[in-house]
Amino acid sequence: MEQRCHKDNDNPPIKFLRSAGGIIFRRKAKNIFEVALIAVKNRSVWTLPKGIIDEGEQTEEAALREVREETGLTGRIVDVIGDKTYWFYNKDENVKYMKTVSYFLMEYVSGDMKDYDWEIDDAKWFDIDEALKAVSYKSDKETLQKAKEKLQHFLIS
């Protein structure tokens, strides 16, 4: 969801975005979890599925929808991972964006990775330790690390 725009005459305008996403996981073996990552930018960037919250949509609904669209997988939310906020600049618009993404931990329910959205170059399962090495952005590594810590709970169950 795009929110208000702040502008002063000396700097580019600032826009605020709200997004939601998730780390969807499945158990590969007794003590091994896999998580889904997506590839973008001609497969040069591996990242977490996320996207803009639509008008009137709840954050959790948006997270489930984005994971389904970008990975082809359906999950159920089992925990909150938290929010990540970062800045980026769009040269074409001459706008600076502050984006906050709310992430959720999701247990895989159904679906097939071959059904990912046309905007995505690829979607793939990774062992969580391999995913930590594969992601391109520091904020994704931090979010995955939090998810890995939360998944320790599932080792007991």
Image: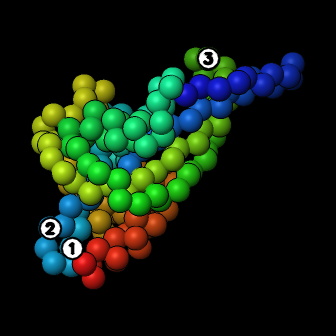
Q: Is residue 81 left or right of residue 12?
A: left
Instruction: Quote the CA–CA distance across marks 2 and 1.
Output: 5 Å
Residue 45 drawn at (x, y percent): 36, 43
Amino acid type assigned to the residue bearing label 3 in the image = Glu
Question: Which one is in front in this view, the residue at disc 1 or the one at disc 3?
Answer: 1
Q: Is residue 57 left or right of residue 28?
A: right
Amino acid type assigned to the residue bearing label 1 in the image = Ile
Mark 1–mark 3 contact, CB under 8 Å? no
Tell me the quarter of the image containing the C terminus. Answer: bottom left
Find disc 2 in the rendering and name its residue.
28
Circle 3 packing at 10 Å, graded few (<14), some (14-19), many (20+), is few
Tell me the quarter of the image containing the N terminus. Answer: top right
Amino acid type assigned to the residue bearing label 2 in the image = Lys
Asked if residue 121 shows in the view, the reply is no
Nearest to N terminus: mark 2 or mark 3: 2
Residue 32 marker: 1
- Furthest residue toward right: 9
Q: Is residue 43 above or below residue 118?
A: below
Q: Quadrant of residue 127?
A: bottom left
Mark 2–mark 1 contact, CB under 8 Å? yes
Q: Nearer the viewer, residue 13 or 50?
A: 50
Residue 93 marker: 3
